[in-house]
Image: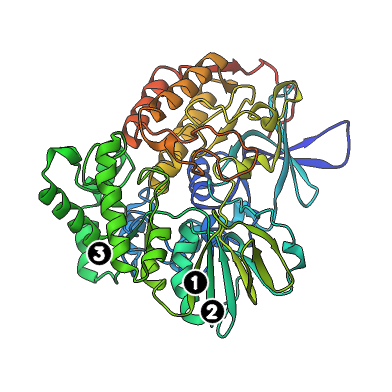
Amino acid sequence: MSALRSVSGNNSAAATEAYDAVVVGAGFAGMYMLHRLRGQGFSVRVYEQGGDVGGTWYWNRYPGARCDVESMQYSYSFSEELQQEWNWSERYAPQPEILKYAIHVADRFDLRSDIQLNTRVDRAAFDESTSLWSVTTSDSKTVTAKYVVLATGCLSNARMPEIKGLSDFKGKVYHTGHWPHEPVDFTGLRVGVIGTGSSAIQSVPIIARQASRLTVFQRTPNFSIPARNAPLTAEERETFRARYPEIRRFAREEARNGIYTELPDRGALDDGDNERRAKYEARWNRGGLTFMSVYNNLAIDKAANDTAADFVREKIAEIVGDPETAKLLQPNNHPIGSKRICIDTDYFATFNRPNVTLVDIRSNPIEEITANAVRTGAEDYEVDALVLATGFDAMTGSVAKIDIRGRDGRTLNQKWAEGPKTYLGLMSAGFPNLFIITGPGSPSVLSNMIVSIEQHVDWITDCIAWMRDRGLDAMEARTDAEDKWVAHVNEVAHTTLYPQANSWYMGANIPGKPQIFMPYIGGVGAYRQICNEIAANGYEGFAMVAAPPVQQRASS
């Protein structure tokens, strides 16, 4: 394909910039997409809403923000030099270090020349007569591209809660997903945190050390495992690097979640009570997400799951001094792991501090925010600052903000009104040459995101190159293949305990959003094999359109 093309219409002096591909977003997905497409000789333009690269890690700067996948695994594998030269400082990298890594990648691979920052994509419309996308950005410019790739991220559209009076609050209001770039000091302030998901679980211990009083408003308690974070020694890094070939292979091909760990060979009820407890204790002391990998049936067998949930509830009771507070912090309305399990540093112990109060807003809902307080049915809690840890419109929210129009002018939002429909999480029928990275219907948020990102980017790049080599103009998912895939995703989900939780996996945190289990739970390795087989069979389930013999549009 060509490099950058100029397209003039109706003999107009104004030229429209034209690219082979437009990529939306310059997080880890968008940057790698740019790198791969450029390597194949395609012209690419990346539009990024933020002021720098990094995606999620550009926006989420709240106190304690940290990845829940170990640093040595939450990193690119496409460049051997990169993974050997970068020195992660801690077992779980903090947000500033992950952002620094993203910036390093952008500079090391000279990506910035094709990235336009501080620019939002507002609209993308497919022209059936030319098989081109017309992409309009927030600076009122329009470019054309044969392909559009949505690298918009799964947890990048922060959800503002609809609480009466919020706009009347006189103090500062912060959302964990849109934190200021300068440090926020809560010293001496009365702070209210609304929400107890992952961002609250990470930030509450730090805010509690600063605030004169911290009030945490909890609707639903979450399971959380200690991170056991620690500095990485040079020896630990070198040992890990030496094993990268096997670690990366295992994460791609054998792991369900793209994380290297021992695979269990038995179920929770195959061990006696003492042995089972010892194994849970060992994983609790090791820390991290692999707690859920101690047995092979925790996600599918409620009785087995109960043994793990009971263990964690007992731990919470051991840590938290006040029995009533401990009881409120113990999750009882969903199986452990059916919401993304959190990892923390001293979260539960923070509620032993004399300056920290937990308010149960399930039994005592927030009625409104006044000028200086959070009002529940029981009392007013005076606060000087509010932290909204209310999560994201996950997986589809960032896509939904773009006016995307496919065949016959139909919008993607119209098509997804009753829930997202994709084939493999990669494409949606009726939207030719529009690719989605880690979209609904793929392992996505159930996995180490970078493992899934690299797999999707490689598959998309290979696909576009395959089309170019065969003179193909357009590609889209077939409706029958899409319907079968959506049914398969739902069928697999309902063999597990995941749909039993009102989670953001289900869209349950967004009022009015259809409750459908969005990610594919079949596992990273199995999913990769399916994608590879479909590609090997000539992209089975996708409809291809050949380019016309004489193209009507200009190209250089």
| Residue with the mark numbered 3 | 237
Q: Amino acid at mark 2?
A: Arg
Q: Kindly report which numbered mark, 2 or 1, lies closer to the viewer in this rendering.
A: 1
Q: Residue at x 51, y 31 (%)?
A: 426
Crowding at dot 2, Cα within 10 Å, few <14 / some 14-19 / many 20+, comes out as: many
In the displayed structure, 363 sits above or below 87; it is above
In the displayed structure, 399 sits above or below 241; it is above
Q: Residue furthest bottom?
A: 188
**Residue 98 seen in this snapshot:** no
**Of pointers 3 and 1, the one earlier in the residue sequence:** 3
Image side of residue 149 versus residue 325, left or right? right
For the residues labelled 3 and 2, say whether their Cβ atoms are less than 8 Å apart. no
Numbered circle sitting on residue 357: 1
In the displayed structure, 481 sits above or below 501; it is above
Q: Amino acid at mark 1?
A: Thr
| Residue with the mark numbered 2 | 213
Image side of residue 352 versus residue 63, left or right? left
In the displayed structure, 108 sits above or below 34; it is below
**Image quarter in which the C terminus is found:** top right
Q: Secondary structure at mark 2?
A: strand
Q: Amino acid at mark 3?
A: Arg
> What is the C-alpha distance between the residues marked 3 and 2?
40 Å
Residue 145's spot in the image, x, y percent?
67, 35
Q: Kindly report which numbered mark, 3 or 1, lies closer to the viewer in this rendering.
A: 1
